[in-house]
Amino acid sequence: MARPLLIKQQYQLFDLYFPLYNQYALFFPLVVMMVATAVFYMEYSNGTYVDWITYGYSKQKLIISKLTVAGLVLLAMCLLNYFIMALGLLLMVHATIVEVLQMTASFWGYSLIVILLNLPFGALLINISRNAIITTVVGIVCMVINAILMAAPFGYYIPTIFAYRFGLLPISRSDFFSNANFAASVGSTITIVVICCLVTLSIWQFSRKKPIEN
């Protein structure tokens, strides 16, 4: 962000947005998993899990309520991040309405897909392991794998990589995949299927009776 202040050069909006997007795409999936971990782990760490599940509501409603709260927290974080980023960029460089809309579509397209993917994945991991360290380590490993494979030509088969490249589509079609139509259809289908599977698995796993409930 300080670059245009230090170097006298004419920058375009996307010249500065692209490196910010890359940094955001690297760490945001881990943040989503940590938020998912936090909202469930508090019940295990405080010893309130059994009390929580005996409130008289079905387990399906309980986990959906937790996921909803985590999702709203993440959306609020995204909104704050977007506002700060957009304000900072627009104070530094001139941008047209179209460019701002493209940046908005890029940021929110990526953010929403990652939330839908990593939120149920994080919930599934923490409710299986009941260990925040394990979930965090898995999140870091996934972050490293994503960083390695971000530019992979077969990335549309991997939902998190597809999300990253999908976020680039509004600002630069050349940064998507070479076979754009095929990649978009295959990537979208796989991503939707994976999201549905993760949500279903997280609800099913949480609904099963655990040893801690005996």
Image (tube, rainbow, N blue to C red):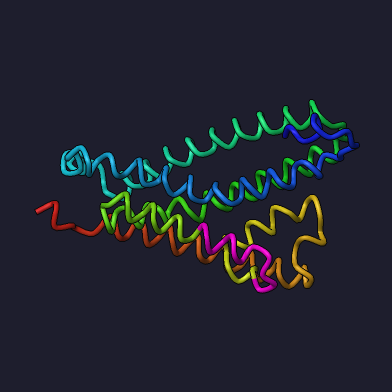
Q: Who is closer to the viewer here, 21 or 74?
A: 21
Give the side of residue 162 with respect to residue 181, left or right: left
Q: Is residue 125 above or below residue 16?
A: below
Judge whether 143 appears above or below 38 on screen.
below
Q: Residue furthest right?
A: 10
At x 43%, y 40%, the residue is 70
The C terminus lies in quadrant: bottom left
Q: Residue at x 54, y 48 (%)?
A: 27
Q: How many marks?
A: 0
* Residue 55 seen in render: no
Q: Residue furthest left?
A: 214
Q: Quadrant of residue 77?
A: top right
Residue 98 in the image: x percent, y percent?
85, 40
As drawn, 62 above or below 116: above
In the shown orientation, is residue 101 left or right of residue 67? right
Image coordinates of residue 126 in percent, x first then y, are 32, 53
Vertical arrangement, residue 145 with respect to residue 214, above or below: below
Give the camera-side residue of 137 and 122.
Answer: 137
Q: Residue at x 79, y 40 (%)?
A: 101
- Residue 36 rendering spot, x and y as whole percentages: 40, 46
Q: Please indicate, yes or no, whether residue 117 appears anywhere in the rendered image.
A: yes
Quadrant of the image containing the N terminus:
top right
* Magenta range: 143-154
Residue 175: percent from left, percent from top: 77, 60
Quarter of the image where one finds residue 176? bottom right
* Viewer-side residue, 161 vs 18: 18
In the image, is residue 36 part of the stretch drawn in magenta?
Answer: no
